[in-house]
Image: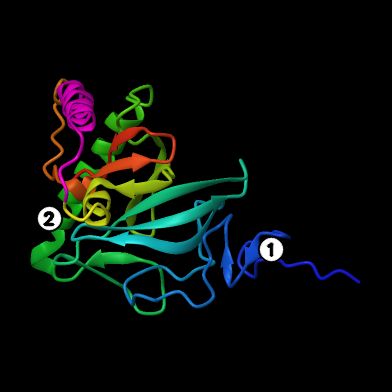
Amino acid sequence: MSFVNFCPNCFQTDSFKGYRCYLCGYEEKGEKDKRALAQGTWLHRRYLVGKVLGIGGFGITYLVFDCQSRQRFAVKEYFPAEWAMRTVGTNVITSNSQSKDQLYTHGRNVFVNEAEILRSLQTDQNIVNVKDFFVENGTAYMVMEYLEGHTFGTYMKGNGGQPVSVDLANRMMKEIGESLCRIHGHMLLHRDISPDNVMLTKKDEINLIDFG
C-alpha cells in the first residue's frame, strides 16, 4: 500500500514534503508572527495563504496558492506597523488611533495607486510583475509573481563579501537604472533601493522588488 502525502492547508496530494508544501507554502513548523494572517486564510475567495515571505514597516508579504490558476504568487498586505493594528480575532486591519486615520487611509490609497501603475508595467522584465490587487479586510493587497532566487544582499553575504564581477555589476546598473527611468515616467518612486530589494532569480534575471 502506498502512502499519499497531502497538504493540510491546500489539500493537494503529493505536494507536502517534510512538513512543507511546495505549492501553497504551508509550513507545519514555520515561525508565526502575531501580526500576520494565519496559514490557511482565504483572500479574495481564491488565494490561500501559506508562509510569510517577509515583514516590513509598511506591509507583510505571503506566499499564496491561487486555486483558480493553480499557481503560486506572492501577496503583499498593506499593514503599516506604526499606524495600524489587526482587530483581535479577525483579519481586519484598522488604524490604531483616531489621529492616525487620515495617515492610514492616505497610505492605503497610495498603495493601491502603486499597484495600478505596476500592473501596467507587466511587460517590464526587470520589475516584479503585479498581476492583481484588491481591497479587503479594511486594507489592500497586491498580487505579484513569485520570484524564486535570492536577493543581491543574500548573494553578497554568501559570496564572502567579495566584489561581484564587472559584468554583473554593469548589467545590474543598466537594467535596474533603465527600469527606474520607466517607473519615474509614471510618477512613481521606489524609495527603498537597496541590495535586499534587488532579486537575482534562478532564471538569471534581475528584478526590482518591494517598493517602499
> Residue 200, image x and y in percent?
32, 40
> Residue 85, image x and y in percent?
25, 71
The total number of labels drawn is 2
Which secondary structure, mark 1?
loop
> Magenta residues?
162-183
Residue depicted at 35% across the width and 26% down the height: 125
58 left or right of 61 in image: left
Depth order, front residue of 4/32: 4
> Residue 104, image x and y in percent?
17, 57
Residue depicted at 34% across the width and 49% down the height: 150
Disc on res. 32 = none
Is most of the magenta stretch helix, strand or loop? helix
Q: Nearer the viewer, mark 2 or mark 1?
A: 1
Residue depicted at 25% across the width and 36% down the height: 113
What amino acid does circle 2 point to? Gln
Estimate how packed mark 1 is, as few (under 14), some (14 to 19) or many (20 or more) residues with alpha carbons within 10 Å.
few
Which secondary structure, mark 2?
helix
- Which residue lies under the disc numbered 2? 102
- Which residue lies under the disc numbered 1? 11
175 is within the stretch colored magenta: yes
Label 2 close to label 1 by CB (< 8 Å): no
24 left or right of 153 in image: right
Calculate the distance from the C-alpha at mark 2 to the C-alpha at mark 1: 41 Å
